[in-house]
Image: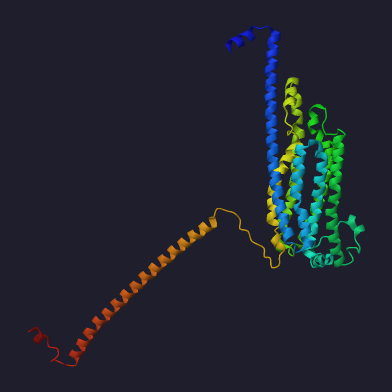
Amino acid sequence: YDIVVLYHLLSPLPMKTQYKRQIESSANEIEVQVEKQRDLTMINMAGTFTLLSCLITMFHMTAHLRKMNQPFVQRKIIAILWMSPVYALTSFLSLTLPSGEPYLGIVKDFYESYVIYQFLSYLIAVLGRGDRNAVVMKLLRHADHLKPPYKCLNCLFHPPPQESDEALANAVLLECQVLAMQFVFFRPATAILSFILEAGGSSGGGDDGDDNQWAYFYSPQFFVMMVQNISVFLAFGGLLKFYHAVRDDLAWCQPFAKFLTIKGVVFMTFWQGLVINVIFHANENNSDNESDDDATMSDSTSSTFTSASSIQNILICMEMLFFSVAHWCVFPAEEWEDGYKARVMSSPGFGFQDFASDVNLIIDSGKRSMQARREEKLRKSDDFATVDDSDGATQATAPSYLSTSVANGDEDKFDVNESFV
């Protein structure tokens, strides 16, 4: 080995340069293999989470199909349960088939918005048992607390909400449906628009030096994201307005927990994607300041999972497993059987309440024991006082007897001198 090293050190410069290039080429090949192995590991992990999520959801849906006691409600539950598999499968296929990611994203966005409206339909079906007029009548009972609908929607209401309380209840119900339904149309439209912008090369970047890291905030993609944000806000505003109006009537089926599982999927993934995009585009141009050699090496060894969309897809595959378990807990099939009673789930803890209860039991037992001993001591002292009083009374009666005898002149019974002799 030393001879080989000495030979290369003493060799001409062209041979040294060739030897250096061979070493760099070998290092690059090793890094490429490491990146490929890491990518394969990420795909396997995402696939495992996706498979588990799909299996749990399918088993859950078969439970509803076996116990289809109220089809008009459970049909909507099954439509909601498809949410986790659709999210997980589209994200996983986007990782394995990057060329199809834009089309799969449109499918995912459409089903996301569709589930929001299906959840509102689920609440209406639960409240009215399939009868819309029954829902209006229940809203009518809360007419004093109903907030009037947006004036821009007055053209949709007949009769006008100012005409009567029943018209107001009907208008509020229709408003909630419109606010949720607009998301079904806007979300796919904005997804298609984003796809067109990306295909046209409008990525939000720029070559303006230090200002290009903020270019995303005034790019078309950012404004499309803001439109999506406004649409999501309106959709969830309609859901919350309906829920607050009839939450007492729906308390038995715990609608807020169900709402959180859906809001978590839609809202969390939306803001998660927005934060990842902002961070990615803000730090994207740091590599532009590196040397050409480092940039070339980085490009040759970069992982396919270093983009914002890939990171988002991996996280969604992992998160859908937990949401499928959450759906299993909040949408039980037994809920729609006759005579169902909601189960109260105890919160997990360390048993501190039981420990405190045992401590209180021991302390109370000690207090009762001390009280009993104190009462026993008082009782004994009272007995001793009674005995002393009776002895004193006996001694006090003797002199009076003697004095009486002497006073009566009974000398035979009491003669001191005779008694002394």
**Nearest the eye: 275 or 11:** 11
How many labels were placed on the picture?
0
Residue in view at x 77 percent, y 34 percent = 281
On the rendered structure, is 203 left or right of 415? right
Does the rendering let one see residue 241? no
Give the image location of residue 371, x and y in percent: 41, 67
Does the rendering let one see residue 199? yes
Give the image location of residue 249, x and y in percent: 74, 65
Residue in view at x 83 percent, y 38 percent = 221
- Tell me where residue 341 sits by quadrant: bottom right
Give the image location of residue 314, x and y in percent: 72, 40
Q: Is residue 103 above or below residue 126?
A: above
**Quadrant in the picture for the N terminus:** top right
Residue in view at x 14 percent, y 90 percent = 413
**Nearest the eye: 277 or 28:** 28
Give the image location of residue 159, x and y in percent: 91, 64
Q: Is residue 292 above or below residue 283?
A: above
Q: Is residue 18 above or below residue 393?
A: above
- Tell me where residue 8 sits by quadrant: top right
Residue in view at x 62 percent, y 8 percent = 7
Q: Residue at the far left: name it.
A: 421
**Nearest the eye: 390 or 119:** 119
- Tell me where residue 167 sits by quadrant: bottom right
Q: Is residue 160 above or below residue 180?
A: below
**Quadrant in the picture for the C terminus:** bottom left
> Looking at the image, what colour scheme do you see?
rainbow
**Nearest the eye: 291 or 108:** 108
